[in-house]
């Protein structure tokens, strides 16, 4: 009988088929190079090749979105750059206590005991001495809170306590867009709004204001910044007036949305297919789609490298001098395995799995 040829492809054909499949799936080499990555300077590179510092959350930690979830930058950097870690060190600690300072030299793995001891350093205590604030500033006036002897507030929005009367400091809100609150009365004391205390001491009372009916009056921040508690920025208004002023500020924000969008959008370069056609600059993806009469989805796929052209045009992001690599900066690719390991270490499950594997190996040897 004559030997029939096997239908199985050879090794060379297998490689060719895998390359073709990869090209179909990814859309070319550009998409492979533009995988998400993090740098030793704490910067993030997305799938479009854009490099920037991630935004911070209310707690002050830098976070970015990837694979459908939010991730802490410091936790991912610890795994991506293989920081030294001992069993039990499940959290990444910031040495200088600044939560969004994510340079590799500022990060280390630590246990909860070490991290809590680092929290107790004088750097984190918000006093005039540790924050290097002067005891008294030029044209600053201090007055004692009428119902709490030893506690003082100034017309510059600063505060002193009876426990540390020789230190002056500016309290900060615990969360973004939140009011500044201070504890009056030491341990077991009551929290009061700093703007309310300063308003009672320094701001002129409006006509019809009385202590008995003070609930109907509120303190309004003129610049709408709740962290700015200077007496010059505060005024007494009724609750109705405060609501009207808030609505006015909200309407101004909505009117300026289009201006903010053009400022925040990325500049795009487009070129018509063919030799000799120049690259044209567009303010945003929507601007390019409107002028070239192309759908935004097609432009988005071109920018990410999934397709080469759309509607007879090629598109790419304009180079931004601010987003260039810095001296000594190194990027590491972010794979799902790295992200998963970072989550496992933070939860403590990684050490449990390692110890379980060691026990299994020991039983097999026996």
Image: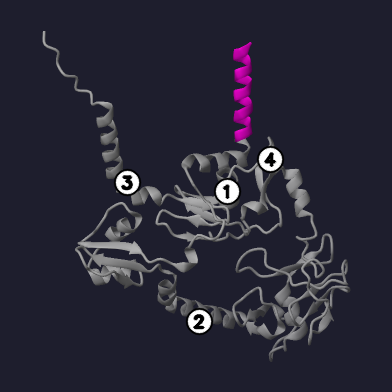
Q: Is residue 343 above or below residue 258?
A: above
Question: Dot 4 lies on which element?
Answer: loop
**C-alpha span from label 4 to label 2:** 50 Å
The residue where tag 3 is placed is 26
Q: Is residue 200 above or below residue 110?
A: below
Q: Tell me which segment is drawn in magenta.
A: 350-366
**C-alpha span from label 2 to label 3:** 48 Å
Q: Are marks 3 and 4 in contact (CB under 8 Å)?
A: no
Q: Residues within 10 Å of mark 3 (few under 14, many from 20)?
A: some
The residue where tag 2 is placed is 248
Q: Is residue 260 above or below residue 342?
A: below
Residue 129 lies in what quarter of the image? bottom right
Residue 349 lies in what quarter of the image? top right
Which numbered disc flags the more N-terminal residue, 4 or 1?
1
The residue where tag 4 is placed is 89
Question: Dot 1 lies on which element?
Answer: helix
95 or 72: nearer the viewer: 95
């Amino acid at each position: 009988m004559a030997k029939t040829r096997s239908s199985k492809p050879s090794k060379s054909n297998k490689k060719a088929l895998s390359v073709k499949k990869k090209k179909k799936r990814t859309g070319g080499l550009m998409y492979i190079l533009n995988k998400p990555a993090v740098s030793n300077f704490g910067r993030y590179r997305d799938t479009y090749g854009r490099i920037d510092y991630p935004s911070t959350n209310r707690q002050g930690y830098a976070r970015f979105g990837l694979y459908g979830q939010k991730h802490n930058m410091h936790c991912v950097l610890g795994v991506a750059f293989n920081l030294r870690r001992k069993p039990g060190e499940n959290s990444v600690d910031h040495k200088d206590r600044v939560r969004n300072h994510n340079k590799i030299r500022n990060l280390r793995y630590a246990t909860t005991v070490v991290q809590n001891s680092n929290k107790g350093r004088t750097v984190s205590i918000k006093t005039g001495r540790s924050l290097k604030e002067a005891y008294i500033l030029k044209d600053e006036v201090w007055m004692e809170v009428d119902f709490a002897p030893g506690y003082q507030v100034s017309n510059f929005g600063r505060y002193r306590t009876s426990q540390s009367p020789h230190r002056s400091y500016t309290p900060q809100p615990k969360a973004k867009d939140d009011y500044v609150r201070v504890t009056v009365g030491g341990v077991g004391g009551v929290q009061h709004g700093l703007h309310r205390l300063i308003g009672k001491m320094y701001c002129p009372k409006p006509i019809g204001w009385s202590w008995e009916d003070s609930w109907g009056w509120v303190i309004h921040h003129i610049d709408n910044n709740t962290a700015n508690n200077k007496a010059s920025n505060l005024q007494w208004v009724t609750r109705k007036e405060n609501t009207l002023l808030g609505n006015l500020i909200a309407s101004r924000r909505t009117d300026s949305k289009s201006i903010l969008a053009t400022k925040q959008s990325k500049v795009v370069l487009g070129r018509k297919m063919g030799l000799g056609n120049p690259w044209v600059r567009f303010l945003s993806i929507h601007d390019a789609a409107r002028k070239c009469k192309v759908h935004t989805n097609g432009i988005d796929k071109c920018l990410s490298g999934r397709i080469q052209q759309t509607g007879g045009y090629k598109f790419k992001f304009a180079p931004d001098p601010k987003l260039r690599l810095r001296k000594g900066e190194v990027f590491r690719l972010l794979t799902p395995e790295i992200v998963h390991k970072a989550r496992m270490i933070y939860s403590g499950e990684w050490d449990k799995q390692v110890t379980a594997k060691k026990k299994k190996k020991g039983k097999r040897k026996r």
